[in-house]
Amino acid sequence: MTRARLTRSPLTRVRPRALAALALAAALAGCAATADSTTTTAPPDVPVRVGVLTTQNLLTLAAGDRTLDEAVASVGARAETTEPFAAFAPAAEAMAAGRVDVTSGSTTAVVAALAGDPDLVVVAVERTDGDTQGIVATPASGIADVGDLAGHSVAVNQGGTGEYLLRLALRRAGLTPDDVETVYLAPPDAAAAFAAGKVDAWATWDQYLVGAQVDGARTVALARDLGSDNASVHVARRDFVDAHPDVVRAVVDALAAEADALAADPAPLADAYRDAGASDAVVAGLTALATPRLAYADEDLAAELARVAELYVEEGLLAEPVDVSRAWHDVRG
């Protein structure tokens, strides 16, 4: 599937969302004005370097329709948006190098990254109905359920959503990783390999999952069938959270406003995927799913992080345990 650079939507598309962003900014400004003198506020014009992804999640959308711009401006900051990253791993590398302050990923990818960068902090979570991630198989493979994966090749992104879903599926079927041929591929490469029949199955998500489904792939299992704890999450660096808590709160409030706007009118989500190169059939499949709901990073998220970290150690995906107890921050204080 072709991926295009992030572009801002035409004014005729974003005007209702721009108005919503203005309302959000006014509310945030009002809160700041009524706060007592001890409240931390950002120095004028603090840059917030935002690493968006090619996946049209809430952060990518909010950065594209000015919701994020208006929210952070209300607390004296400005958003500086990168070119889209294909996945969390390169975005995390940019964050570790000090080029990005806020980005997005999956719970699983964050847990894997914490082994090398303990200063990642989840600040918000996107909740879905568990149907945006899953495992698909080619019709020719004969795979109908997770037990049938034995003896077949499965494409996954190493250490992330795909490999996590595969390990959950194998556990459910009483299989081990040795029972399948795991093929490590980045999502665009996995899409090409799967379409060409070079791999029998593929554990993936979002537009990649729906793209395979509309092209005739068999859905072997969805995340909800596997008891997945994996979600889309939004991540900041700990030093940025500590230095600018009001800016991080404004980012999260912008994500919440974006989620509310999509629930009322999902058309901008369809437009964003179409502009990024998705076919009409894929767009229709994506917009048939419930739009994501924004949740704060809280004790529920902490428990999910801990379960994923435990599984990663048990499965040998991490050489030793990682401390996830401080890898989240509730912006509500």
Image (cartoon, rainbow, N blue to C red):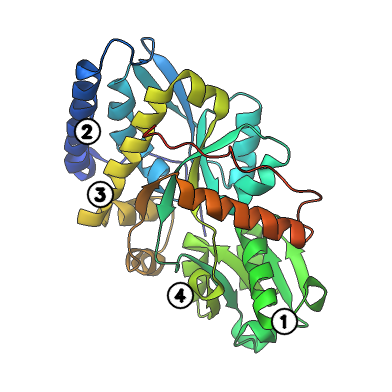
Q: Nearer the viewer, residue 208 or 24?
A: 24
Decide which of tag 1 and tag 2 comes sooner along the chain. Answer: 2
Q: Is residue 62 left or right of residue 151?
A: left
Q: CA distance from mark 3 to mark 2?
A: 12 Å
Q: Is residue 11 left or right of residue 64?
A: left
Decide which of tag 3 and tag 2 comes sooner along the chain. Answer: 2
Q: Residue at x 61, y 72 (%)?
A: 195
Q: Quadrant of residue 177?
A: bottom right
Residue designated by label 4: 214
User: Is disc 3 placed on a helix, strand or loop?
Assistant: helix
Q: CA distance from mark 3 to mark 1?
A: 41 Å
Q: CA distance from mark 1 to mark 2?
A: 50 Å
Q: Residue at x 42, y 15 (%)?
A: 46
* Residue 260 numbered tag: 3
Residue designated by label 1: 174
Q: Residues within 10 Å of mark 1 (few under 14, many from 20)?
A: few
Whether 26 is drawn above or below 8: the answer is above
Q: CA distance from mark 4 to mark 3?
A: 28 Å
Position of residue 67 measured from the top left corner of the image (x, y, whole percent): 29, 35
> Type of residue at label 4?
Val
Decide which of tag 3 and tag 1 comes sooner along the chain. Answer: 1
Decide which of tag 1 and tag 4 comes sooner along the chain. Answer: 1
> Type of residue at label 3?
Asp
Q: Is residue 30 left or right of residue 173?
A: left
> Type of residue at label 2?
Leu
Q: CA distance from mark 1 to mark 4?
A: 30 Å
